[in-house]
Each structure stands twice: as C-alpha cells, then as structure tokens.
Amino acid sequence: EFLRPISAPYSSVATGTILELRDDVYSLDARLSTELAVCRQLSFYSDVSYRFFSYQWEILWRRQLHEMLDLQVNGFNESYLGMKWFPLEYVGVAANFRFFPGEGSQKERFPRWGLEPMAFYPISAFLYFGAAFGFYSFLERDNFQPGMEIGEKFSLVWKPFYKISTPNG
C-alpha cells in the first residue's frame, strides 16, 4: 500500500520506486502519486503502482531442489482513488477506494472502501506530526465476504527549507 504523509490538502505529483522482498519473492515497482487540491479544505488523490518484475529464488537442503528461479508476471499492482476533506484547520477525513490489483500483484486482494479520520499538528515551522485511524470494508466477490479491517497510520514530516504556514521554498 502506498504511504502518503498525513497532511492538509495540497497539490503534488510524486514518483518513486520500491524494491521489495516479501515471502521470498523479490520485486521492483514504480509508483505514481498525484494529489490535486481544489481549495484549502478539499483534495482528490490517486496512487498507481506498476510491477516491472518479480522473481523467487529458493534453495532447499537435504535431497531437495537446491536452486530454483521462478520469474513471475509483471503488470499493474494496486491502484487507489481518494479524497481528503479538512473542515477544521488540523482535523479532517479521507475516503478512498482500492481497485482490484492487476497481474503484478503477489497476493489475492479484494477491492476495498476506506474511511480515515485524521489530524496533524505542526510541531515547528518545518516539522509536523500526523495520525490517522482507518476503517476499511472489503467488497464481496463470488459469495465470499472478506470482512472489515481497522488500522492506524502515523507520520512525521520534516521539510527543512519549506515553511508549512507559508508554502514556499
């Protein structure tokens, strides 16, 4: 899942790559994250991930397979659409939807609705702390009801040349 700092709405475009090791599978993803602030209280965001490759390398001992390389398919991974609304200066809520992952996902995932009440506090002119609690509901597929999840996020953002109160730098 793409991690974004907990902050008030702002416009941005960010790209990145992630080299990941999960369950003995190595993978390389490229991510694109955009956020468009319509006003100081409301923004819309999207996160898209594309997996370039993933492979599994296994070494087993004692009369077993000693080296195995399993290249897996590449393709779109997880994608999100969402919105943030801050009716108060430091307190807001985000709503998001995660689509079915594409061929690049390692796990079988369900589409998901999320609601995240959040707040952030500027500790200094260049540093702020954010916290959010997430309530997620997975959509039913093929008469299987995956249920719900509760989660939490914390972020600490330090921008030494960018004042939060006067966005410049």
Image (tube, grey):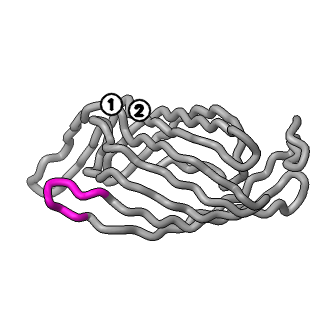
Q: Residue at x 40, y 48 (%)?
A: 98
Magenta stretch: helix, strand or loop mostly: loop
Quarter of the image that includes the C terminus:
top right
Q: Residue at x 33, y 50 (%)?
A: 111
With respect to residue 69, does 93 lie above or below? below
Residue 24: give x, y in percent of width and height.
31, 50
Is residue 2 rendered to the left or right of residue 65? right
Image: magenta residue range: 139-145
The amino acid beneath tag 2 is Tyr
Residue nearest the viewer, comparing 158 with 90: 90
Residue nearest the viewer, comparing 72 with 140: 140
Q: Residue at x 37, y 62 (%)?
A: 137
**Which residue position holds label 1?**
75
With respect to residue 37, does 84 lie above or below? below
The amino acid beneath tag 1 is Gly
- Label 2 with label 1: CB-CB less than 8 Å: yes
Q: Quarter-wise, where is residue 14 in the image?
A: top right
With respect to residue 64, does 169 lie above or below? above
Residue nearest the viewer, comparing 116 with 161: 116
Is residue 11 rendered to the left or right of residue 66? right
